[in-house]
Image: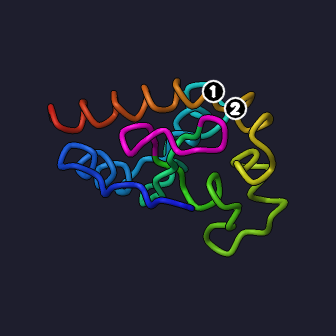
Amino acid sequence: MWSKAPPPNAAEGARIAAAKVGPCMACLALVTQQLLEPGLVVYGCDYNHAKSGNVRRGHAFGYALCTWHHRRHPLGGNSFATMRELYGPSLMDGSRVFHETYGTDDELIAQQTLVNELREAA
């Protein structure tokens, strides 16, 4: 029998809400690798819950991904080819290539935590 995960607590809900306004952690990884211009970073994101053994690790273990990086939905009327050229692979292209390109789940979670802390401090 499947059991539904409990809803996020206040801190987890705040993390998810902050992540959803962006920026995309995969886009930021490309910026740090000098593969994407900072002005092309996507804001307004999905929240990707990291998994272990195909089970969600919990609401605190997630990070922002734009619809391209999360669900392979092209942005702004661009073609799949243009999106792949500009933004690289999507999580839907496979976990291995995604993490080789942008970092591990733990690295992306840590990056999300830092972005949230910097936003709160500003």
Looking at the image, what colour scheme do you see? rainbow
Q: What's the amino acid at mark 2?
A: His
Does 78 sit left or right of 11 as displayed? right
Q: What's the amino acid at mark 1?
A: Gly
Along the viewing direction, whichever of 68 and 86 lies nearer the viewer: 68
Reply above or below: 99 against 93.
Answer: above
The residue furthest front is 1
Along the viewing direction, whichever of 84 and 91 lies nearer the viewer: 91
Q: Position of residue 61 (x, y in %)?
A: 43, 37
Q: Which residue is mark 2?
A: 99
The secondary element bearing badge 1 is classed as loop
Reply above or below: 37 against 71.
Answer: above
Quadrant of residue 67 within the rendered picture: bottom right
- Tally of numbered discs: 2
Does 117 sit left or right of 57 as displayed? left
Q: Position of residue 108 (x, y in %)?
A: 51, 31
The secondary element bearing badge 2 is classed as helix
Cα–Cα span, label 1 and label 2: 5 Å
Q: Residue 118 shows which numbered tag?
A: none
Q: Residue 103 shows which numbered tag?
A: 1
The residue furthest right is 81
Q: Position of residue 92 (x, y in %)?
A: 75, 54
Does 11 sit left or right of 107 as displayed? left
Q: Are marks 1 and 2 in contact (CB under 8 Å)?
A: yes
Q: Position of residue 74 (x, y in %)?
A: 69, 67
Quadrant in which the N terminus appears: bottom right
Along the viewing direction, whichever of 28 and 65 lies nearer the viewer: 65
Q: At 58% from the left edge and 40% from the top edge, which residue is drawn?
A: 51
Reply above or below: 74 against 24.
Answer: below
Query: In the image, which residues are magenta?
Result: 52-63
Does 112 sit left or right of 38 as displayed? left
Quadrant in which the C terminus appears: top left
